[in-house]
Image (tube, rainbow, N blue to C red):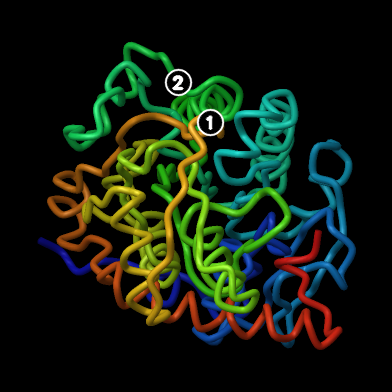
Amino acid sequence: MSENKTAKSTLSKDDLIVIAGAGGFIAGALTRYFGEQGFTRIRAVDKKPLPEWYQRVPGVENLSLDLSYRDNCKRACEGAVEVYNLAADMGGMGFIERFRIECLRSILINTHMIEAAYRAGAERYFFSSSACAYNTELQKDPNVRALKESDAYPAMAERGYGWEKLMSEMFCQEYWAERGLKTAIARFHNVYGPHGTWDGGREKAPAALSRKVIEAKDSGQYEITIWGDGNQTRSFMYIDDCTQGIDMIMHCDDLIATPINLGSSELVSINELVSIIEEIARVRLERKHDLDAPRGVAGRNSDNTFIEQVLNWGPDTPLRDGMAKTYAWIEGQYADRKAGKPTPAGDH
């Protein structure tokens, strides 16, 4: 097997890398990742005003643009050698089940961005897809079999968000087939870590549950409300595994226009996740289950056979280790908010 290629081994240090959605969690981390790799020309784009970006990386060109508009995408992609599209209106289950139209409208972002990247002469284009693109009929049992890439068809994606991802994947595949633009498509499985959304309605389970535990300790009310019965199962991928995976997938010619799982295969129930957080926080809470709350599919896990076969690599940060770092960061953010300091990733 040939050595895995990365941006570092493929690009010049002054090649322009464009990262869309960079005011948010994953794209913000990707911007920092490439900055630490020594790339000197990175253009970060997000529709949020700059003070609301989750993290800003020194030396990066930051643009506040709504990429659902074509002209803004054209501006974003000017001179780009590589374009990473992670911009989307999304959040955790509480958001994507309630705001399906907003999720669907993200198709405008990818449609305009991939055309702009193509017209700008970009060499490669990355699209962040999601496990929500998978057939929901296969996810009705908590003891779920891991989802492999072919399980997206016959299509029965998650309403709203999942269908947008599936359609946008198709755009990426056709731009390669018809126009020769090298596209990369990664299906993310529940990414978590520091600098992610932790409050306000868009946060995902690891951050939401960490915040609830911190709030319980702070208030002295030693109880926690869990959405659903807590038996629903998921795998969660630590952010550092995600950014490394994006880089390798983007630069692997065997994966052009080929959707691939990017997620951990360590399956846990939501109840087990709560236990991990309690252990980190050194607390035991009385559990209450809200059976009317959004809970998503019963079970979802990443089958990593394909990524391990092609890249000889897979996300491997143990959930306990990643959650310890995430919990500590959210605890710091919670303290900052109480002290009146700005906390963009957690502001309502």
Q: The disc labelled 1 sits on which kind of residue?
A: Lys
Closer mark to the observer between disc 2 and disc 1: 2
Q: Is mark 1 on a helix, strand or loop?
A: helix
Q: Taking 225 as reference, is 50 above or below it?
A: below
Q: Is mark 2 on a helix, strand or loop?
A: loop
Q: The disc labelled 2 sits on which kind of residue?
A: Ala
* Quadrant showing the C terminus: bottom right
How far across and down, in percent of the image, does residue 9 sit? 38, 75
* Front residue of 256 and 27: 27
Measure the alpha-carbon separation of dots 2 and 1.
Answer: 9 Å
How far across and down, in percent of the image, does residue 82 sit? 58, 58
User: In which quarter of the view is residue 160 placed?
Assistant: top right
Residue placed at 62% from the left, 34% from the top? 96
Residue placed at 67% from the left, 31% from the top? 103
* Front residue of 321 and 135: 321
Disc 1 packing (10 Å; few <14; some 14–19; many ≥20): many
* Front residue of 298 and 47: 298
- Of callouts 2 and 1, the N-terminal one: 2
Disc 2 packing (10 Å; few <14; some 14–19; many ≥20): many
- Cβ–Cβ below 8 Å for labels 2 and 1? yes
Q: Mark 1 points at which residue?
A: 165
Residue 157, labelled with which disc?
Answer: 2
How far across and down, in percent of the image, does residue 40 sit? 65, 83
User: In which quarter of the view is residue 292 placed?
Assistant: top right
